[in-house]
Amino acid sequence: MATANQAAKALNDLSHLFCEEDNQAYEEVLEDYFLNDYDGLDDEDFDRENFTEYDELESLTSQNDEPSDPEDSDGEAPPAGQQIAHALARLPPQNPTNTTGCDMGILDQTEHDRIQTFLDGGCGCSGHNSIVCSERFSPNDVLEFRSDCSEMTRAELDLVILGKLSASMSVIGGLVGRLHKHLDTPRIRGHIAYAHQGWPIGWPICSSMFRFLHTVGEKRMKNLVKSLKTNGLVPRVHGNKHRLPKNTLSHEDIKEIVTFLTNYTEMHGLLLPGRVPGYSGTDIKLLPSSLSKRGIWKQYQSMATGGRVSAYTTFCRYWQTLLPAVVVMKPMSDLCWTCQQHSAGIKRATNSDIEKSSALQEYLDHLHVVTLERSLYTKQLQQCKESVKKHYSVDGILTAPPLNCCVPPNSVDIEAHYSFDFAQQVHYPSNPLQPGPVFFLTPRKCALFGLQNEAFPRQVFFLIDESGDCGKGANTVISLLHYYYFEHHGLGEKTVYLHADNCVGKNKNNYVLSYLLWRVMTGRHTQITLSFLVVGHTKFAPDWSFGLFLRGYIGGLTLAVSKTS
């Protein structure tokens, strides 16, 4: 776009085309648009050396352009319109990349047209002192004020309008109207004297002009007046702000979802903090990878009683919001070799539907066995917890007895459940801030065995130093069960349920079975039930405690076995 100096040069070249009256108007235009910034400067205050725009103008006028001959070949001057077009054509072309200014110009022109149309048509009022409101405003003043109102947010503009209405509205409670000459009645509608900033006192404007100045419609203005009369000078609040949609779930429906997920997690969930990559929470509860959120949602649909059944997306949203610790186990954390073989068999059986159906059925049978074993595990846990609560509770709260309480065996008529397992061995000395290589060539090993009573829950760890370690066979398991647990940390129960992983060398052998039979024959227990988890699905309560132990061990300083405990 041509600069102001270039436009001024073109206008200066055309000054001889106008008559004396036109020259006066021409000078006024130049003063309004090009000389306002330098009004009031005397010749003494004018610094020509530092006036860059003057230098630019001089350089433009001194360019070696072709002289414009005001007369044609016949000696007559061409029309002024042709010379104006010829002068404007010599201006530099408009920059095509400056599209923002062009768009803003179009918008400004549209707003100018809207304002001019309104002012020309009039506001429609009878006016004040025989002068209507629209004739008292100039287009520039209206444009400036409307631009200020457009820059405000909706709430800010509401407060501005409410403030003006509050200052000009009559108090309804103090006004009376007369329906009868002897009867005074409260006035229903108060008078509003619309006013504008900078407007002389006593010169009100009409409501139409007031709305046009503030860029609001008639309906919004009525709502603002109603809000001011009802609530006073306070920001407006939408009527649906604190109102729930019609399709929202009630509190009872949401509570039913949480109860279902909680009970479902108690039956199928695993507590494994710190032992599964990607799960760092201490209260994480993992569901088997064979399950899916959609399958759990379908079970929720079939078991829902009364009320409204939520959709799948709503079910997942409340699950993520209210129970974020319950997650479905990732396939990488499910290390069952049988499951992986069945999954690979289903993928390979692509040529025959019979082979695919057979592989799928085998996979489902395996998962059915896993589900039955897990259900038995959770059922025994709940049964023993209720039984222990009858004897070991204070004011209805389950309270664990102190360690080394030495309760005589088979002396309390309760049922107890114990789970035991070996963890990976740890090494010491261990320092999380080890500045250099360790002093020992090989750190000392320490075996870790845990036996947990899930009713409280409480787990006892057995740390076995490298010098006294005799392996993880049946001899070690029997010794730890008999001498170190039942004799010192037992509850004196009559019925015992034991759970262990499906390892032949440690637990599933004749020596362990013979030891448990010996305890029943000698009267140390009335009944003992030993169960083994399915291979590949052996994550149970001791693994949860091992995860907590290893998290503290890795982050702490350990120099000896005594420091580890």
Image (cartoon, grey):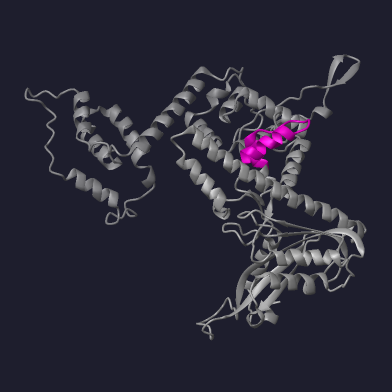
**Residue at (92% x, 65% y) in the render:** 411
**Residue 237 visible in the picture:** no
Q: Is residue 62 above or below residue 160?
A: below
Q: Quadrant of residue 161?
A: top right
Q: x and y percent of residue 504 in the render?
A: 64, 62
The span picked out in magenta is: 293-318
| Quadrant that contains the N terminus | top left
Q: x and y percent of residue 183 in the render?
A: 90, 17
**Residue at (69% x, 51% y) in the render:** 269
Q: Nearer the viewer, residue 212 or 23?
A: 212
Q: Is residue 267 magenta?
A: no
Q: Nearer the viewer, residue 293 or 347?
A: 347
**Residue at (52% x, 45% y) in the render:** 343
Q: Residue furthest left?
A: 73
Q: Is residue 299 magenta?
A: yes
Q: Is residue 424 above or below residue 312?
A: below
Residue 146 falls left or right of residue 397? left
Q: x and y percent of residue 101 in the render?
A: 37, 37
Q: Nearer the viewer, residue 451 or 212?
A: 451
Q: Nearer the viewer, residue 179 or 92?
A: 92
Q: Is residue 475 above or below residue 378?
A: below
| Quadrant that contains the C terminus | bottom right
Residue 521 falls left or right of residue 511? right
Instruction: Assign the magenta stretch its main secondary structure.
Output: helix
**Residue 227 visible in the picture:** yes
**Residue at (12% x, 36% y) in the render:** 67
